[in-house]
Image: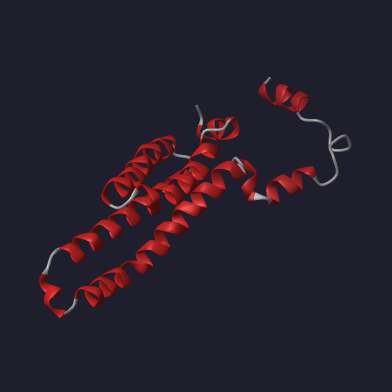
């Protein structure tokens, strides 16, 4: 009986689209869902920013020591700034990779983490320094909560 039902469900070979079976079998990516651009672009940009920031971290330490002079080599502030920059960079790389993989928690962590980083820049340095960071933060955050992105994350 099972084979009879199975035969009824499958169209005869003459009715099937030419090459449809071979096309589905030859393309292993068909079973994966497509990532919308509103998810891929922010995820890629976050990962890229994290990688660039880690690459520039040693230069922060070198410039800080050049500006402060030789007596400040033992002060902990440049090393703390370096640790903070590397830590934020690693979090950005992790969040970008998890957003690209479709993890819903990653976009919520980015929403709160990014706002905290922009707020810290505004408090510790100057509110004018936070304006470009806030613009980039919003440009990457808004697409992550659009309808297509929400559907991709499975809510």
Residue visible at 43% across and 48% down in the picture: 131
Tell me, yes or no, if residue 51 can be seen here.
Answer: yes
- What is the total number of numbered labels drawn onto the structure image? 0
Task: Provide residue 24's location: percent of width, then percent of height.
Answer: 71, 45
Q: Is residue 93 above or below residue 36?
A: below
Q: Quadrant of residue 87?
A: bottom left
Image position of 31 (left or right of 6):
left
Q: Is residue 145 above or below residue 59?
A: above
Q: In the depicted view, which residue is nearer to us: 76 or 109?
A: 76
Which quadrant of the figure contains the N terminus?
top right
Residue visible at 30% across and 59% down in the picture: 85
Q: Quadrant of residue 110?
A: top left
Q: In the depicted view, which residue is nearer to us: 75 or 17?
A: 75
Task: Provide residue 102's location: percent of width, then percent of height.
Answer: 48, 40
View extreme (bottom): residue? 70
Q: In the depicted view, which residue is nearer to us: 91 or 133?
A: 133
Residue visible at 14% across and 74% down in the picture: 73
Image position of 74 (left or right of 31):
left
View extreme (right): residue? 14
Q: Is residue 4 above or below residue 124?
A: above
């Amino acid at each position: 009986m099972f084979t009879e039902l199975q035969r009824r469900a499958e169209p005869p070979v003459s009715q099937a689209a030419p090459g449809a079976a071979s096309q589905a079998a030859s393309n292993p990516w068909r079973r994966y869902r497509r990532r919308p651009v509103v998810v891929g672009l922010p995820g890629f940009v976050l990962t890229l920013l994290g990688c660039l920031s880690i690459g520039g971290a040693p230069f922060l330490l070198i410039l800080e020591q050049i500006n402060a002079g030789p007596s400040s080599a033992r002060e902990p502030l440049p090393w703390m700034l370096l640790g903070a920059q590397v830590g934020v960079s690693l979090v950005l790389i992790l969040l970008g990779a998890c957003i690209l993989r479709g993890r819903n928690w990653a976009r919520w962590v980015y929403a709160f983490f990014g706002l905290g980083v922009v707020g810290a820049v505004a408090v510790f340095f100057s509110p004018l320094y936070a304006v470009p960071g806030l613009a980039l933060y919003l440009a990457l955050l808004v697409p992550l909560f659009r309808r297509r992105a929400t559907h991709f994350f499975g809510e």
